[in-house]
Amino acid sequence: MTRNNNNSMTISEKIFSKASGKNVKAGDFVLANIDKAMTHDITGPLAIKAFYEIMESKDLKKVWDPSKIVIVFDHQVPADSINAASNHIMLRNFAKEQGILNYDVYEGICHQVMPEKGHVKPGDLIVGSDSHTCSYGALGAFSTGIGSTDMGAVFASGKLWFKVPETFRFEIEGKLQTHVYSKDIILHLIGEVGIEGATYMASEYSGKTVKNLSINERMAMCNMAIEMGAKTGIIEPDRTTEKYLQERILDYTLDEYWSSDEDANFSNIRHYDISELEPQIACPHNVDNVKNVTDVEGTKLDQVFIGSCTNGRFEDIEVAAKIIGDEKVAENTRLLIIPASKTEYLKALKAGYIEQLIESGAIVQSACCGPCMGGSFGLLGDGEVGLATSNRNFRGREGSPESFVYLSSPATAAASALKGEITDPRKI
């Protein structure tokens, strides 16, 4: 692709221009080359079936490029049913047959494992058969979720049709208060624009506040772009990105091309000063039903879940451990902690946080999705109320359709576990 400096583009338009081999703009339809494809144990079997059907019709033997496909087991690990075990066998056999990297049950949640293991770079076009694939935009990639049938087509051809999305730019300034985090920012934005406010757009987060966020906190924001209807969440890569990648990719050097031009065309621009932002809570049963923590304080809780691809990293566990200290979890409240990956689990273990949290009364599980998406354990029963650091609180999302799920940051979750009710972490 020829880089035309007179043709101003957003970072998303630049990525699609590279992927399609020509300069494109928002609204264009393109057949784009995929840089990396990811599937997991829930959606992977359907993608494999679709690929085998294409193989038979096209007389293919192999996927387009096994080095660009990654399989991660994270939803039902270890297998919690005979059906899950059968799916795992299918995926293992497929990975072996095709020479595909399979992390199996050992590494953790796909959206943590992919960037953690160096599979994501600025300027990449990445697809995953999971809606929260948009997380990888924290590193300046355009990453998005696709269906299993589409993934089968990607396995066969390495290409996929896209409509180049418009960009909704969020310019965020101000210094966060103590115990207010990027999770609070993204919940606030979703509450402001609604669950359809950025439909099929690239949600681009910018401003000094975003520049000062760690990769962990950027991932939390990009992860939840889908909750406002966006095709992806994306943040321009910078020196923080470069440092993160240099720890994972040999001789990596940041290409400053991967940023939006100053005079690029944005479909919408909103400015926010978050200096006075309170901790935020998404209330049942929609992610955009967002309120200040002070408006829902005192809501009794049966369970608190700290984990998921949104907030299950070392920094999140550290925040929770420091808030809980040597105190005990409230009587009649369960605290469930699930690190996002084996690597993040070991960091917390070596720092002493796992032992500390277990002593406080927490239940700590090995890295996986856990109760998020109605997983195999930690589910809520009829009438129970849970507070989670995950990304969705739809009816029945974490168990019974008669339960109630609130969403918050790890800080708010930890403070609430101590009190047994939704609590402002600034008071701890």
Image (spheres, rainbow, N blue to C red):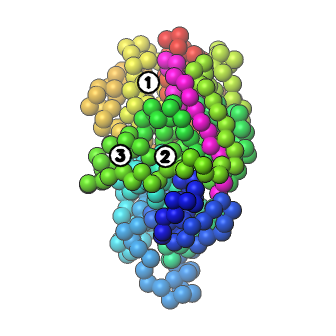
Residue 30 numbered mark, or none: none
Residue 236 numbered mark, or none: 2
264 vs 19, nearest the viewer = 264
For disc 1, the marked residue is: 320
Q: Is residue 366 above or below residue 418?
A: below
Q: Is residue 415 above or below residue 61?
A: above
Label 3 crowd bin: few (<14), some (14–19), many (20+), radius 10 Å: some
334 vs 100, nearest the viewer = 100
| Residue 417 image position (x, y, % from top left) | 52, 20
Per the image, is 142 magenta?
no
Residue 242 numbered mark, or none: 3
57 vs 279, nearest the viewer = 279
Residue at disc 3, secondary structure: helix
Q: Quadrant of residue 365?
A: top left
Residue 291 makes an appearance in the image: yes
Per the image, is 170 magenta?
yes
Residue 41 makes an appearance in the image: no
Numbered range of the magenta stretch: 165-184
| Residue 62 image position (x, y, % from top left) | 42, 80
Type of residue at label 2?
Glu
| Residue 91 image position (x, y, % from top left) | 44, 66
Q: Quadrant of residue 351?
A: top left
Residue at disc 2, secondary structure: loop
Disc 1/disc 3 C-alpha distance (Å): 28 Å
| Residue 97 image position (x, y, % from top left) | 37, 75
Type of residue at label 1?
Ala
Q: Quadrant of residue 7?
A: bottom right
Q: Are marks 2 and 3 in contact (CB under 8 Å)?
A: no
